[in-house]
Amino acid sequence: MEKIILSFLLIFIIIGCQQTSELEQQNIEVPSEQKLPQQEIAPPTVENHETKPSQQRRQSPIFTSLEGCEEKEVTFTHLPLPIDKINVIEPQGELTGYVSGHITPGDHVGFQYDSKSPAIPVYALADGYLVRVERNPGYFGIGVKNYHLYIEYSCTLFGSYVHVTEIAQELLDANKDFKELDSFEDDSIPDNKRYPSVRIPVKAGQMIGKTEKWGLLGMLTADTKVTLTGFTTPKIYEGEPWKTHAVPVFNYFTPELKKQLEQKNPRTQAPVYGKIDFDVPSKLVGNWFLENTDYSGQQKAQYCGDYICPYWDSHLAFVYDFVDPTQARVSIGFKALEDQGPYGILGNTDPKTIGADGVTKLELVKLNDITSKRGFQSEGKQLITENSDEVLGTMLVQMTDDNHLTMEVFQGKKASQVSGFSGKEKKYYR
């Protein structure tokens, strides 16, 4: 049996899917950065139970065994939530700033609902198997359970639900370890009980649980028949093997369900369900990582004041807004400016136009929330934004070759006030 040590997705599950501001709006105490989970833990070791020692046990990109999986084409015939409960959908590629942690574009999508409504049923999208369960700590004092459920739809298609707060009784009855896990109070769960190994069949349209209070049901979908080509060095993401196969769940719904979701989608430009891979060889655009780190962070723990730096502290991205891709965005993993980010660029300079041809000055501006102006309602977070004219600081960036750059941010300075690097610059690669 696989031994799930700890969730490498802990940040993604609890914080990345929902910005701190959303929880503040609900008058829920938000922990300080010191209290937030900081580091990703290595993925679980998979024991090999094959009869032939020379045979390697196959593993899915969500760290589950492929033993017993089905080779089949899959179409999602049911929505995860009732259509009348979905306020708005979030495309792939969300950025949330250095407090919440999506510094590079988020690989999941979101279904927002009214956080004040009673618990809402959550449904299986298609026939498959529940193959992995994670019960995560109840951060923010919301007062409900917080499950991450992983589904195997076929040998090549996988998905997950983030922020499920109640599990259907028939699923609990199908596995004693799962049932035991559900019986614990949040503050009394032994770490070795949080991640039971399961294989429970689910049918399309079956209610697998409920969700409430978070205001968001996050969903990850990974299709190993699809490999994203916009990552210059895929090896950087080996700690999250689903990353290079992450696709928007919306692509797999029936035409009828896609039609129902159209009016819930604030993004109108192709690809309408978002994008996460933006790297272009020899250009600034895309994801960058502090030298001697990778996506999972520091090879050796570093301290940010009196606490261990979060893994995203070493991330940097020059990408595009996940709702309006005509707007460039800069996302910085550490506290470079008072506003947590992401940031716009004064003049909306396109990072695809910047190469290894000298030092570039980018004046970083605050974003204005125009969600309600566009006719949408969002659960406390800035969903639809546009650049303001408020300059927060200036970034100096210089690509030293196709895959290396030097960067420094000068808080409160305009471009005319910055003449060059100060000696405190950071070096990144990809």
Image (spheres, helix red, strand yellow):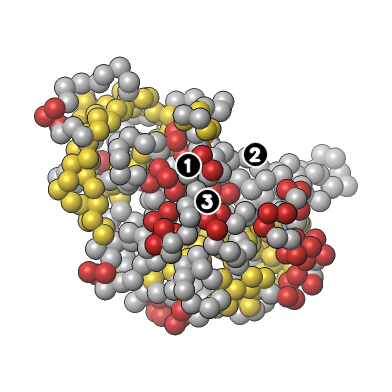
Residue 232 falls in which quadrant of the image? top left
- The residue that label 2 is drawn on is 42
Q: Secondary structure at mark 3?
A: helix
Q: Residues within 10 Å of mark 3 (few under 14, many from 20)?
A: many
Q: Is residue 27 left or right of residue 156?
A: left
Q: What residue do we see at 43% from left, 62% from top?
A: 27
Q: Hey, which residue is sitting farthest right in the picture?
A: 51
- What amino acid is labelled 2 in the image? Ala
Q: How far is disc 1 from disc 2 in space, using C-alphas?
A: 22 Å
Q: Which mark is residue 12?
A: 3
- The residue that label 1 is drawn on is 33
Mark toward the start of the polypeptide (3 vs 2): 3
Q: How far is disc 3 from disc 1 in space, using C-alphas?
A: 15 Å
Residue 79: percent from left, percent from top: 52, 76
Q: Secondary structure at mark 1?
A: helix
Q: Is residue 371 left or right of residue 51?
A: left
Quick one: 356 or 4, which is closer to the camera? 4
Q: How far is disc 3 from disc 2 in space, using C-alphas?
A: 15 Å
Q: Is residue 234 left or right of residue 63?
A: left
Q: Residues within 10 Å of mark 2 (few under 14, many from 20)?
A: few
Residue 221 falls in which quadrant of the image? bottom right
> Pointer 3 and pointer 1: residues touching (CB < 8 Å)?
no
Q: What residue do we see at 62% from left, 54% from top?
A: 137
- What amino acid is labelled 3 in the image? Phe
Q: Secondary structure at mark 2?
A: loop
Q: Residues within 10 Å of mark 1 (few under 14, many from 20)?
A: some
Residue 217: percent from left, percent from top: 51, 66
- What amino acid is labelled 1 in the image? Glu
Q: What residue do we see at 34% from left, 44% from top?
A: 340
